[in-house]
Amino acid sequence: MSMRPFWIEQALFNDGDLAPALQGAQRADVCIVGGGFTGLWTAIQAKQLNPALDIVLLESDLCGAGASGRNGGCLLTWSAKFFTLRRLFGEAEAVRLVRASEAAVQHIADFCREHGIDAELRQDGTLYTATSRAQIGTLEPVMRGLEACGIQSYWTLPPDEVVRRSGSARNLAGVYSPIAATVHPGKLVRGLRRTALAMGIRIHERSPMLDFSTGHPVTVRTPAGSIEAKKLVLAINAWMASQFPQFERTIAIVSSDMVITERCPELLRRIGFTDGVSVLDSRTFVYYYRSTADGRIMLGKGGNTFSWGGRIAPVFDQRSPYEVELTQALHSFFPALEGTPITASWNGPSDRSVTGFPFFGRLNGAPHIHYGFGYSGNGVGPTYMGGQILSSLLLDLDNAWTRSPLTQGPRGYFPPEPLRYVGSIVVRNAIRRKERAEDEGRQPWQVDRMLSKLANAAGKADKA
C-alpha cells in the first residue's frame, strides 16, 4: 500500500496547505515538471535572476513526495569524489565543482535563514568512518589529491575522537570535514515551495504530466488542464527513465532504505550523540546515520532493491523490505537503542547514473526543453547546483555552468536488459559477501573482490 514519506508527514503537520491542481488552459514563460529539490531550486533561482519571468511548476503528487522527501537529509559535497570528477572533466573543472558543491552547503543555509525556513539545518560537518580494518585509510589518497589542489577540508581524527563524535564504538577510524550539514528534507522542500509561491511562482500539485508537445511553444497536458510555455524543464529525476525510452539505459533505479527511531533525547545525551554530524562508513553501499533535532536516530543504507528497466516498482512506496536488517545494523552501532521502538521505515528510488554524477541537457536536441537528473543518492546539496545549471540554461546565459561538461547529457550507458538487472544483482551480492567477510575479519573470495570492482562511481567516495 502506498504511504506518504515520513519526512513529508512531519512537514505537513504544520503545513496543510496544498496548491490547487491545474485547471483549464494556461500560459507561462517557463513550465517546470517536478516539484522536488531540482524543480524548486530551478524555479527560485530563475525567478531571482529574472523577476519578470512567469513560471509554472507542476507536481504529480505533493511537492517533495518523491526522492526529495525520502532521503536521509545528509547535505554533503562532492569532495570525496574528487578523483572521479578529475578523470571525467579534468582537474580545473573538478576543482571548480568541488568548490561549488561546498559553496552550495552555505548557500542553502543562507537561503533558509533569509526566507525563514526552519529546515532543522545543522552545519556540524560529516564524518567518514571505517567499520572494518579493510576500510581504514580509504579516503587518504583523495585527501592528498585535494590538498595538492588547495581544496582539502578533511582531517584524520584519533580513534577515541571518532568514537566520541560518531557515538559508536563500531567506528574504528575516521576523517572529518566541517563543510557539510544535516537537514529535515521534508521541511526544506516544503519551505522552498512556500518561498516559491511567495515569489509569484505558480505551483500546481496533484497535476501529473500526461504528455507534451515538442514544438515551440511547448504544450504540457495534465488530467484537467494544459500549460503552453516557451520553455520546459523536466525535473522528475528517477521517474525520467520510465517515461522517456531514450534515458532507459542512462540510469539504474536502486533503493535507499531507512529506519528512524522514536524520540529518545535522554539516551542520545547519554551516549553523546546530539549534534547534527552525518556519519558514513566506507563500504561501497554505505551505512549512514545521523540524529535529528527532535531526538531520534535515522539510519539508512543504499544499494538494496534494483528495478527492472528503470521502472518505479511498487516497493518504493511502501515500508522498507529491509527494515529488520536495518534495525539490526542500527543496534550494532548503538546497542543502547535495542529497547527503543522504530517509528517508521521507508525506501525511495535513487537515480544512479553511470558516473555517479547528475547530467543535464536538451531533450532530443530541442533547445527549449531542458532536463537534469542522475544525482545518484547525493542530491540534497547538488540539486542546488542543478538549479544553478538549469536556470542558467533557461535564461541562455554564458557562464561556467552553461559551459560545464555536466550540461552535455549522459556520459555512458548501462547494458540493456536483462544484462543490467542480472548484472546489478550479481555485483550487489558479491559486494555484500565481500564486506561481510571484511566485517568478520576474513579474507573475501577473489571472485567477490573482482566483481566488487565493477560497481560504478555512485558510491560515497573514490577508492584508491
Image (spheres, grey):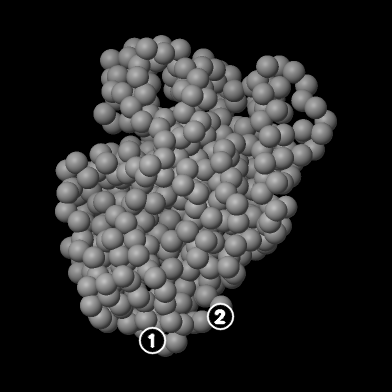
Q: Which mark is residue 72?
A: none
Total number of numbered discs in the rendering: 2
Q: Nearer the viewer, residue 37 or 95?
A: 37
Amino acid marked by disc 2: Gly
Read off the residue under disc 2. 365
Label 2 packing within 10 angstroms: few (<14), some (14-19), many (20+):
few
Above or below 345: residue 121: below
Tell me where residue 143 appears, x and y as whole percent.
Answer: 62, 39
Residue at 43% from the left image edge and 61% from the top image edge:
236
Image coordinates of residue 70 in percent, x first then y, are 39, 44
Q: Which residue is mark 1?
A: 217
Side of 149 where 434 appears, left or right? right
Measured as percent of width and height from the top left, residue 279 is found at 48, 30
Please give the name of the residue rendered at 25% of the width and 39% of the height, measured from the top-left corner. Answer: 10
Q: Amino acid at mark 1?
A: Pro
**Quarter of the picture holding the N terminus:** top left
Q: Do we see residue 288 in this rendering?
A: no
Res 219 visible: yes
Q: Secondary structure at mark 2?
A: helix
Image quadrant of residue 171?
top right
Q: Is residue 375 left or right of residue 60?
A: right
Residue located at (32% from left, 44% from top)? 4
Q: Secondary structure at mark 1?
A: loop
Quadrant of the frame with the C terminus: top right
**Is 210 situated above or below 351?**
below
Q: Residue furthest bottom?
A: 216
Q: Position of residue 61 (x, y in %)?
A: 32, 56
Q: CA distance from mark 2 to mark 1?
A: 15 Å
Q: Residue at x 42, y 64 (%)?
A: 235
- In front: 63, or 80? 63
